[in-house]
Amino acid sequence: METRFRMNFGEELQVGEMLVVESGPGSERFLIRVMDIEHGADADDMNWMTTEAGHMLHMDAERREYDLGAIRDDLYCVGVSAPLGCVGDEFRKTKTIPHHFSTVRRTSIDDYEFLKSSLGDVQVGNLRSGDRVLDFPVGISGKAIPHHIGIFATTGMGKSNLMKNLALSCMRLRKYGFLVLDPHGEYYDGGESGKKGLKQAGMGDALVVFSSRKLDGPYNTLHVASSEIQITDLENLYEFTGAQKEFMESAQFRFGETWLTDINDKSVQEISKALGEGKYHEGTINVVKRRLESLFRFDLISRDPKLSITNHIIDCLHDGKVVLVDTSNMYEAEELLISTVLSRAIFEKNKALYGDKTEFDKIPPVLIALEEAQRVLTEAKGTIFAQIAREGRKFKTGLCAVSQQPKLIDSEIISQFNTLFILGLADRRDREILRNSAKQDISQLDNEIQMLMPGEALIASPFTPFAVPVKIHLYEEYLDKAAADGGPRKTFRKTPVGATFY
């Protein structure tokens, strides 16, 4: 599970770099990934390098020059690597080791031909080996969407840039529905100077925008009908006592579809009389009323079911469009309510269509992206998001969790996310959580994850043979290269690293 190779003094090598070991006379090659790099020297004394360093320091103090060339041939570095697999007529996992003194070289595009069937049509960047970026598109397969996707990174490492690339790819394909819930206002127009958003992609027919604030461009006003809101949706926002929940259930039974507006509009005395004098304490009714008042203040909840956007959004998603819902001027409670109501409506619609195979086969997979996902994925039971995480793959409904802190997401829920985009993560506990939940073995990649630069990522998925390193397109630059996907592919020469197994 670990192999080492030697290279000459001065050779460049990076953690995360992928190399090829040409072993034996056959065409089969070993693909390896560098995990660590160590110094070495041909000397009988284990402390020889430390001693020589001491001589250098003395000579520096005496302003004498040390002749490094005299010992250059005795110095080398050792690459510590993990095997990824064997590449021949097909790719297979490694069950043996290369021959002694096999040649080690850098990879070329031809070495990755086997990956084409694994890297799907939703493209986000190019294959990366260390810092070296190859002209080899990388993405995920649409079949990964219902199996849930996680995007995890520290602030500033490129989560939003990755999300825009996913949305752009979906807009181009028109094969998958993608709902992007944006609480920060950064996806429509970029959110800040120098940044570009989805509207600059120029694909208005593939993008539908809903917003609670005024936008500089075409958009739809954001409303949900009060009749669509369930008690479970409100429980996702607030903690209710048993008495408060019982009161809401009684009000829903008594008032029907208008229960929410009736609690908001009627006085405590009127509600108490309608439900039975003295059955519920006035304090219980008042607490629920105050919480509902905060939801009605933004004119977000419509009393007219015809003004609801829910069915329109579902139709757009089933038409293979990207739907952007901008909730950036809302308080957290209102924003979470929108997320909950829309997610439940999409899931329940797809679940209802499941009974009609002909109609169900017509709809595309739908992905629901949740920013700051740890806010709603902290519990394994009770919420619509937990239900989608457990059952969504059966009903073509996937979650895309975007978070800086995977450790705050319930372990049962995060285990349901089959495809992970891992960008730079500084927190050791966060890396441990992903290491334990990833469907690919990433236990040896801790060094590489810590060293990831902004825009660099690992894609760990059961649909790929190993965790694939990728350089995510910088969205603004990618928009300016309209013909990039159709351009000629560069050819990389097979350059030896000057290394050999020992």
Image (spheres, helix red, strand yellow):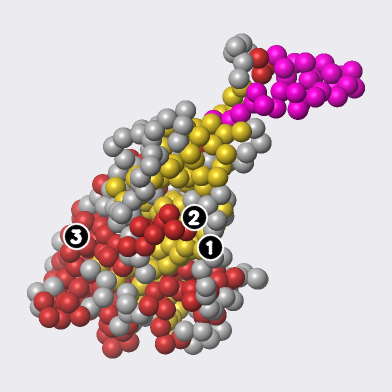
Q: Is residue 111 left or right of residue 349?
A: right
Label 3 to label 2: alpha-carbon separation: 41 Å
Label 3 sits on residue: 391
Q: Which comes sooner in the sequence, label 2 or label 1?
A: 2
Q: How crowded is mark 2: few (under 14 residues within 10 Å), some or many (20 or more)?
A: some
Q: How crowded is mark 3: few (under 14 residues within 10 Å), some or many (20 or more)?
A: some
Magenta part of the chain: 51-78
Regarding residue 410, the answer to whether it shows in the image is: no
Q: How crowded is mark 1: few (under 14 residues within 10 Å), some or many (20 or more)?
A: few
Residue at 81% across / 23% down in the picture?
66
Give the numbered dot on residue 351: none
Residue 327 drawn in magenta: no
Q: Which comes sooner in the sequence, label 3 or label 2?
A: 2
Q: In which quarter of the image is residue 367?
A: bottom left
Residue 209 at what x, y percent from top left? 43, 81
Residue at 28% across / 88% down in the picture?
306
The answer to whether the residues at label 2 and label 1 have Cβ atoms under 8 Å apart is: yes
Q: Report the quarter where the N terminus lies.
A: top left
Residue at 55% across / 45% down in the picture?
496
- The kind of residue on which mark 3 rests is Glu
Comparing 26 with 39, the one in front is 26
Label 2 to label 1: alpha-carbon separation: 8 Å
Q: Which comes sooner in the sequence, label 1 or label 3?
A: 3
Label 1 sits on residue: 491
- The main secondary structure of the magenta stretch is helix
Q: Is residue 469 left or right of residue 441?
A: right
Residue 404 at what x, y percent from top left? 46, 51
- The kind of residue on which mark 2 rests is Ser
Q: Is residue 64 left or right of residue 353?
A: right
Element class at badge 3: helix
Label 2 sits on residue: 108
Residue at 26% across / 47% down in the picture?
412
